[in-house]
Image (cartoon, rainbow, N blue to C red):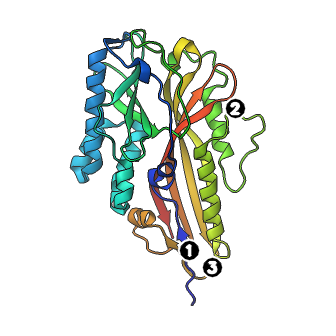
């Protein structure tokens, strides 16, 4: 029997897509860095200390395997961000030195850009770190649901090149949490996320006439990657990609309530069907997750996509940051 080979190339997202998106981005609040207090919820020095500790633990977790690493990850992350970082740890051995370097942060302390206002819970903050090699800022959404729970990273992604986030209100005033102050936005974040997910499906995306969002580099790269994988399988099999809205993690309102920075998560499913009597060679990431070295009939990969939107009070929303993480795989 003749063996047909093709590569299932969907890989760990920061390496496959966002590491290729180099360029400049503009961070909200850089010119108004926190000095004395952060409005209401957490004093300024305490917010900075919390951010530094969480980021330090997250970095330690990235380099720690096994149970010790999982304990660190449980300390620094929550929700889908925790699921993503645990999956990243399983795939760490498939990364090249250059890919690992692309993910490394600078040694600079993280910057708290905004903290939720008032003394009620849940509380949130937006924190910026920077990748050393590309210089791209990373925005993370840290949350705590109650007085007994420490702040943890609930969502995080590097900014896209040429993107920018408008300023938040001054740090002494704080920023309203999206869930407490969602009125006045150009589009409901849940509806926005659903429309964005539908526009990304391959090979048959939903029509995007009058879309509530503008074109962005992350979506362009996703579509190009899906087409490339489909083309590579021509004559061997088929490739499809489905996206579904998973969660609006949260966000903070921008200065003067002129929009919001919103952190969201999508589910993505990549499916390869082998149409031949031979086998298809999967990617190293697929092999690491499944133990399979060839695909006879079907391969499925599931990824979490963290997408950051600036949603204005009028006009279209813009994707300002994104990153994908392969979290599971199966095949026959």
Q: Is residue 56 left or right of residue 165?
A: left
User: Residue 290 or 92: which is nearer the viewer?
Assistant: 92
Which residue carries the number 2 mark? 212
CA separation, marks 1 and 3? 11 Å
Q: Nearer the viewer, residue 261 or 325?
A: 261
Crowding near the residue tagged with mark 3, few <14, some 14–19, many ≥20 C-alpha atoms within 10 Å: some
Q: Nearer the viewer, mark 3 or mark 2?
A: 2
Residue at the disc numbered 3 = 276
Q: Residue at x 76, y 44 (%)?
A: 207
Check disc 1 and report the residue beneath it: 6
What secondary structure is found at the residue carrying circle 3?
loop
Evaluate whether residue 124 shows in this view.
no
Estimate the x, y position of residue 282 in percent, counting from the top left. Answer: 49, 70
How far is mark 1 from mark 2, CA to CA? 37 Å
Q: Secondary structure at mark 2?
A: loop
Rounded to the nearest whole Å, what is the CA distance between mark 3 and mark 2?
A: 41 Å
Q: Residue at x 33, y 30 (%)?
A: 110
Label 1: how many Cα within 10 Å (few below 14, some 14–19, many 20+): some
The answer to whether residue 332 is seen in the rendering is yes
CB within 8 Å, label 3 to label 2: no
Is disc 1 placed on a helix, strand or loop? loop
Extreme-right residue of the structure: 209
Measuring from the top left, give residue 120's x and y in whole percent: 39, 12
């Amino acid at each position: 029997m003749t063996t047909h080979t093709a590569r299932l190339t969907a890989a760990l997202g920061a390496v496959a897509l966002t590491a290729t998106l180099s360029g400049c981005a503009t961070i909200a609040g850089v010119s108004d860095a926190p000095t004395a207090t952060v409005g209401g919820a957490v004093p300024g020095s305490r917010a900075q200390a919390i951010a530094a500790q969480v980021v330090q633990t997250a970095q330690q977790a990235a380099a720690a395997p096994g149970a010790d690493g999982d304990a660190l990850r449980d300390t620094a992350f929550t929700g889908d961000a925790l699921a993503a970082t645990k999956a990243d740890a399983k795939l760490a051995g498939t990364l090249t030195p250059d890919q690992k370097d692309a993910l490394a942060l600078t040694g600079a302390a993280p910057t708290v850009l905004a903290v939720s206002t008032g003394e009620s819970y849940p509380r949130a903050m937006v924190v910026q770190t920077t990748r050393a090699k590309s210089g791209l800022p990373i925005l993370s959404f840290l949350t705590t649901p109650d007085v007994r729970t420490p702040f943890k990273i609930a969502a995080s992604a590097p900014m896209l090149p040429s993107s920018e986030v408008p300023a938040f209100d001054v740090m002494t005033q704080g920023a309203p949490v999206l869930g407490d102050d969602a009125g006045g936005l150009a589009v409901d974040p849940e509806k926005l996320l659903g429309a964005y997910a539908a526009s990304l499906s391959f090979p048959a995306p939903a029509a995007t006439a009058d879309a509530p969002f503008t074109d962005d580099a992350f979506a362009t790269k996703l579509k190009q990657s899906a087409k490339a994988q489909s083309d590579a399988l021509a004559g061997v099999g088929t490739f499809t990609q489905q996206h579904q809205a998973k969660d609006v993690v949260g966000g903070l309102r921008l200065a003067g309530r002129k929009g919001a920075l919103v952190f969201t998560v999508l589910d993505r499913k990549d499916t390869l069907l082998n149409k031949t009597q031979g086998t298809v060679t999967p990617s190293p990431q697929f092999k690491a997750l499944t133990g399979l070295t060839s695909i006879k009939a079907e391969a499925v990969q599931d990824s979490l996509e963290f997408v950051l939107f600036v949603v204005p009070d009028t006009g279209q929303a813009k994707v300002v940051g994104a990153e994908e993480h392969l979290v599971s795989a199966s095949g026959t």
